[in-house]
Amino acid sequence: EREILELAERNVYFDTDKSDIKPHAYSYLDKLAELMIKRPDWKVGLKGHADARGTDEYNMSLSKRRSEAVPFYLMNRGVKRNQLIVEYYGESLPAASNASERTRYLNRRVEMNFRWD
């Protein structure tokens, strides 16, 4: 279970100006969905982020679309809506510098944190 959670956490990144989940993340999210169906008491917080390109307003909207893409994917695989908590932060909480394309990529993400009630 821990490996499934860690792999899902580390594999949801986005291309510039996109909110589509990349195909390489599907298998990780599928395994996460299977696990969450078996564990209905688990919840996952999904926090959308953007790099610093674009206006603050646009990046907030983009991070919202990103953070909503993941629960939509998971719900389509049977996860209950009440297990998913969506938040979005635009460019306000970078994981890395926005100085290069490589580091900006790390900012175009959905972070997950798991909660057990």
Image: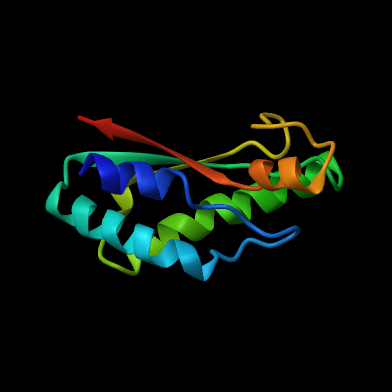
Residue farthest to the left, as pictured: 38
Residue 35 falls left or right of residue 112: left
Vertical placement of 94 versus 62: above or below?
A: above
Name the image quarter holding residue 93.
top right
Vertical placement of 50 versus 12: above or below?
A: above
Residue 86 falls left or right of residue 88: left
Residue 108 pos. (x, y %)? 66, 47
Name the residue rendered at 59%, 54% in the picture: 66
Residue 99 pos. (x, y %)? 84, 36
Name the image quarter holding residue 116.
top left
Name the image quarter holding residue 45.
top left
Residue 4 falls left or right of residue 24: left
Name the residue rendered at 61%, 49% in the picture: 64
Name the residue rendered at 64%, 32% in the picture: 95
Q: Quadrant of the N terminus?
A: top left
Residue 35 pos. (x, y %)? 20, 53
Q: How is the image coloured?
A: rainbow
Q: Quadrant of the C terminus?
A: top left
Residue 10 pos. (x, y %)? 46, 45
